[in-house]
Amino acid sequence: MFEEPEWAEEAPVVADLGSVALGLRRTATSQIKGANRRQLLATLRALEVVETKKKLTKKGLFAGASSEVEEKRKKKRHKQGPPSSDSKEEEVERKKCHKGVLLGSDLAEEEKKKRKRQKQIPSNLAQPLDSLDQTDSKAWNSSATSDLTKPTCETPSSNPPHTLSRKQWRNRQKNKRRQKNKFRPSQPPEQAPAPASAEEAEVPSAPSPDSHGARAEALRARMAQRLDGARFRYLNEQLYSGPSSAAQRLFQEDPEAFLLYHRGFQNQVKKWPLQPVDRIARDLRQRPASLVVADFGCGDCRLASSIRNRVHCFDLASLDPRVTVCDMAQVPLEDESIDVAVFCLSLMGTNIRDFLEEANRVLKPGGLLKVAEVSSRFEDVRTFLGAVTKLGFKVISKDLTNSHFFLFDFEKTGPPRVGPKTQLSGLKLQPCLYKRR
């Protein structure tokens, strides 16, 4: 029989070798991929280390370069002499410009290097770390040398890119003017302008003793006015809080007290919008001049000076020769001897009933009683009018329109209709007390 050739026996062996080779290729490719990944991680770590080294070396190089530049400048200053204000400002601006240029160049170079590294990383995966370090160091050295050779703002010929603000420009102009004025020759005393007279005129003169005396007098007058006001308020309170007999004794013992009280009263009257005595005088001028008038609490006899009628003036003290000093509860007049009785802001004290009964005694039948009082004293006007009618009067007219004063007119109808012991609550009026201002 035929014998099989040798290659036929070796064919299955070759087929087995092909399958083994395929398996080996697959394992090799997987190993290559793992190695590539490890190499990528190693290269990234190495780049980080290189960047940190570069930053540290940059700081050292720039510090050395700046120290060399400062030494050169110091030598130039020693040669040139003391710097002026303009040169100082220029140096400050140059330093600012130099710092700005260095910072700008550093930022630009770092951005360029980052872009180059991003492009070179995929192509240089298999490159060893030593070659990377060498290329990076070469690039750093070339960049550092190029930075040192670049022109900066230190040269006086180059114009600084920094723009001055308005305040800086004004300060520079002021410094220039001061520098010019330093070297100006001083003017002789004959040619110097004479603004001293104007300045002396502007300087306030020392206060003269006359002004001190005037101030002292004004202060004394002010203090005296305050003291008078305090005494007036005290006297006014005494007149309203006690009977008329006590007030009469007070003024008899201290005649100046009545003058002070009357002065304070006149100061208060000036502030009033209406003086009720003028209103009463106007009404009496419309009546016959033959009527006899009795003014209870006349004061300075203003009513007697304003009308043509005969007027009996009564008060606790005298400010006018026409005044009869007496207690208004007991006037020196005969019964039924007058036609008009006037109480203008004089119902003071706690014995108002005695005043009205005395007015009823001296008035003729059908005589006229006129009363003017401060509106704040009346709690209830009706009770007051009712109490007055019980004393032998009837209401003819009343004027309550004024905000400060009330005016009443009564006619005598006869003697009082109540006994002296009966109490009339309507005649208790509130005291008119002045506040401290």
Image (tube, helix red, strand yellow):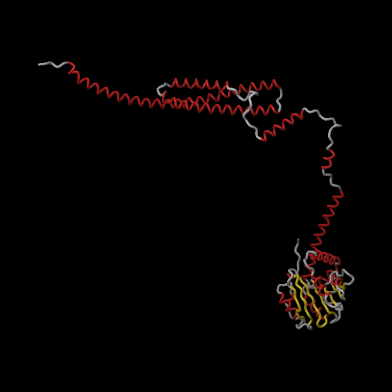
Q: Position of residue 418 (x, y in %)?
A: 75, 82
At x 86%, y 67%, the residue is 255
Residue 220: quarter of image = bottom right
Q: Position of residue 424 (x, y in %)?
A: 73, 78
Q: Position of residue 343 (x, y in %)?
A: 80, 74
Task: Please identify the quadrant where the N terminus is shown.
Answer: top left
Residue 72: quarter of image = top right
Residue 214 in the image: above or below residue 258: above
Residue 55 in the image: above or below residue 432: above
Residue 87 in the image: above or below residue 425: above
Q: Which residue is outermost to the right?
A: 321
Residue 433: quarter of image = bottom right
Judged left or right of residue 83, residue 40 is: left
Task: Please identify the quadrant where the C terminus is shown.
Answer: bottom right
Res. 430 visible in picture: no
Q: Which residue is outermost to the left?
A: 1
At x 76%, y 77%, the residue is 397
Foreground of the two, 59 or 407: 407
Q: How many marks?
A: 0
Q: Position of residue 309 (x, y in %)?
A: 87, 76
Res. 93 visible in picture: yes
Foreground of the two, 99 or 190: 190
